[in-house]
Amino acid sequence: MRKIIWVSRCVFVLLFVLPTYLHAADETPPPVIGVPFSEKELKAYSAKGQSSITGVAFGRTNGGEIICSNSVYLFPDTEFTSQWVKQSIEHNGPIRPSDKRLEPYTRATRTDPMCNFWFYRLPAGSYYLTGVIEYKSGGSKMIYGFVELEKGEHQNVVVAH
């Protein structure tokens, strides 16, 4: 009797549990940020400033067609966001951090038909720019850039793939 119960358990594991486990192991796990979130690092980015960033955000197909990123996101460079960007690039992940605590410090804008974007009244500091290119073939690609601003400085940047 014990042998039948043991065999039944083995069959259950082989038929139901193992395939579920193997399928889950094939999926790419979501990025996990190992650096603690620091409100202290972000405090300077909550104020209005005198700096600005303008630029273009686009991708180019193999045939040379230019495709604009619809939106561009700007968020401060901290240890937390640096790790998030690195992981997102590796996994072609989301274009903006999903941690709700970053929302007050994240800015977003839409591009115009010529792929231009604008961010004004920024405090001095270091920033990441991200966007996504949606190719007609159905694929998408994250684009990103990095900008350091001094007080009152304006920078024009290209964020492209």
Image (cartoon, rainbow, N blue to C red):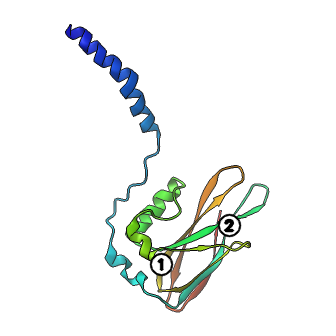
* Mark number displayed over residue 161: none
Amino acid type, label 2: Phe
Return the x and y of residue 111 as percentages of the image width and height: 66, 73
Residue 65 pos. (x, y %): 78, 61
Mark sitting earlier along the chain (1/2): 2
Query: Which residue is farthest left?
Result: 2
Q: Residue 86 appears at what percent x and percent y?
A: 47, 61
Query: Label 1: few (<14), some or many (≥20) within 10 Å?
Result: some
**Is 68 positioned to the left or the right of 150 in the image?**
right
Residue drawn at x 42%, y 54% is 31
Q: Residue at left 33%, top 68%?
A: 37
* Quadrant of image for the N terminus: top left
Q: Mark 2 — residue?
A: 58
Foreground disc of the pair 1, 2: 2
Residue underneath mark 1: 126
Residue 129 quadrant: bottom right
